[in-house]
Amino acid sequence: MDEQREKTRKKIITPLQARSKAEAYCAYQERSQQEVRDKLYSYGLHRAEVEAIIADLITDNYLNEERFALAYASGKFRMKGWGRYKIKLGLVQKAVSPPLIKLALSSLDDEAYTRKLKEILEARARATKENDPYKRKYKLLQYALGRGFERELIMDILEANDL
C-alpha cells in the first residue's frame, strides 16, 4: 500500500528546478504547450508558477506551438503513415489551436500524401488473402480509413489501381 502511495504522490520541486527540467524536456523534442503544462503540474507546481514558466519557455524559444504542430504533422505522416484525419485528431488531443492545425495539415505535400497512401494500400493488398474483389476493396478501405486517410482519396486510388 505504501508503495502505491509513493507512486501517486507528486514530486515537489522548486520553480527554478522545474524550469530547468522543462527546458531539457523541450530541448529533447518539440512539445506542445499542454504537454509541458502537464509535466510541470506533475512536479507539484501551482497554476501561476506553471504559466510563468511556460511564458519564459516561449520567450526563450524552447516552446513554439507552430513549430510543434508542423513537426508533429510531418513526423506522423512520414514515419507512421498517418492520414490527415488521424494527425488532426492527435493535434486536437495535444490542445493545439485550430488555425495551427490547419497550417500543419496544409504543410503536407499533396503528391507525397497520395503516393504514401498508394504505397500503404499496395502493401496491405499484398498481405490481404481475400479473393472476393468487393470484400477485398472493403478491407483495404477500412484499413486506410483507420490510418486517417480521406474516403474519397482512398476510393480514387482503389479504382485507379485495381487493388
Image (cartoon, rainbow, N blue to C red):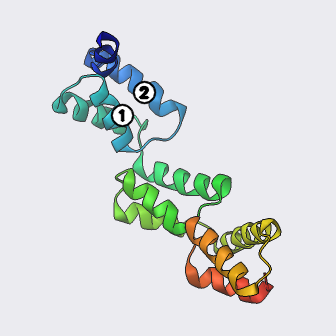
Image spot of residue 28 (x, y percent): 53, 31
Q: Is residue 117 visible?
A: yes
Residue 144 position (above or below residue 58):
below
| Left or right: 124 as drawn, with respect to 36 | right
Between disc 2 and disc 1, whose residue precedes? 2
Residue 39 position (above or below residue 44):
below
Task: Tell which of 40 and 103 is nearer to you.
Answer: 40
Res. 59 image quadrant: top left
- Mark 2: secondary structure: helix
- Mark 1: secondary structure: helix
Q: Residue at x 58, y 85 (%)?
A: 152
Asked if the residues shown at circle 2 and circle 1 are in contact, with their CB atoms under 8 angstroms apart, the answer is: yes
Image spot of residue 50 (x, y percent): 24, 31
Which amino acid type corresponds to the residue marked 2 in the rendered image? Glu
Mark identifier at residue 23: 2
Res. 11 image quadrant: top left
Q: Is residue 59 visible?
A: no
Q: Residue at x 64, y 74 (%)?
A: 110
Image spot of residue 61 (x, y percent): 42, 38
| Left or right: 8 as drawn, with respect to 156 | left
Which amino acid type corresponds to the residue marked 1 in the rendered image? Leu
Image spot of residue 118 (x, y percent): 74, 73
Q: Which residue is mark 1?
A: 57
Mark identifier at residue 141: none
Task: Tell which of 109 and 89 is nearer to you.
Answer: 89
Q: Residue at x 62, y 82 (%)?
A: 153
> Callout 2 environment at 10 Å: few (<14), some (14 to 19), or many (20+)?
many
